[in-house]
Image (cartoon, helix red, strand yellow):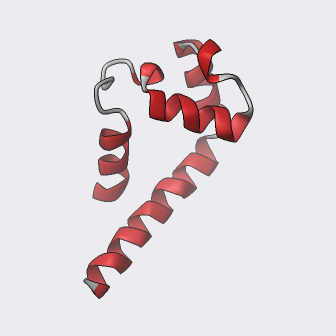
Amino acid sequence: MLAPMRFIWNATRGHRLAPWRSEFLRWRVETYSGKPAETLRAKDMFSFVWSSRWELLSFLAWTSRLEKEARKRG
C-alpha cells in the first residue's frame, strides 16, 4: 500500500491540494484519454478518475509489485 501512496504523493508534487493542476497528471490523463491537458478542470479529472478507477487501481498495484521486485534485487 505504501508504493501507490508514494506514487500519488510524487505525482502531485506542488499541487497536492489541487491535483488537477499537476502538469504531470494532466499530461498522463491527456495521454491516456485523449482529452487536451490545457482544458482539464477539476470536474474532468474527477470524472476521469472515477470512470478509469479499476485501471488506475491496477496500475497502482503494478507500481507496488515493481517496487517490491526492485527491493529484492537491490
Q: Residue at x 49, y 64 (%)?
A: 62
Q: Residue at x 47, y 54 (%)?
A: 60
Q: Residue at x 33, y 77 (%)?
A: 70
Vertical order, 54 against 44 (above or below): below
Farthest-out residue, bottom: 73
Vertical order, 16 against 55 (above or below): above
Vertical order, 31 against 69 (above or below): above
Q: Residue at x 61, y 34 (%)?
A: 29
Q: Is residue 1 left or right of residue 24?
A: left
Q: Is residue 67 left or right of residue 61?
A: left
Residue closest to the eye, 63 or 25: 25
Numbered marks: total: 0
Quarter of the figure that contains the N terminus: bottom left
- Could you say where residue 69 lies in the image, as x and y percent from the top left? 37, 79
Farthest-out residue, right: 34
Residue closest to the eye, 54 or 33: 33
Dividing the picture into quadrants, the one containing residue 53 is top right
- Could you say where residue 64 lies in the image, as x and y percent from the top left? 39, 64
- Could you say where residue 11 lies in the image, as x and y percent from the top left? 38, 39
Dividing the picture into quadrants, the one containing residue 35 is top right
Quarter of the figure that contains the C terminus: bottom left
Dividing the picture into quadrants, the one containing residue 38 is top right
Vertical order, 25 against 62 (above or below): above
Q: Is residue 16 left or right of residue 58?
A: left
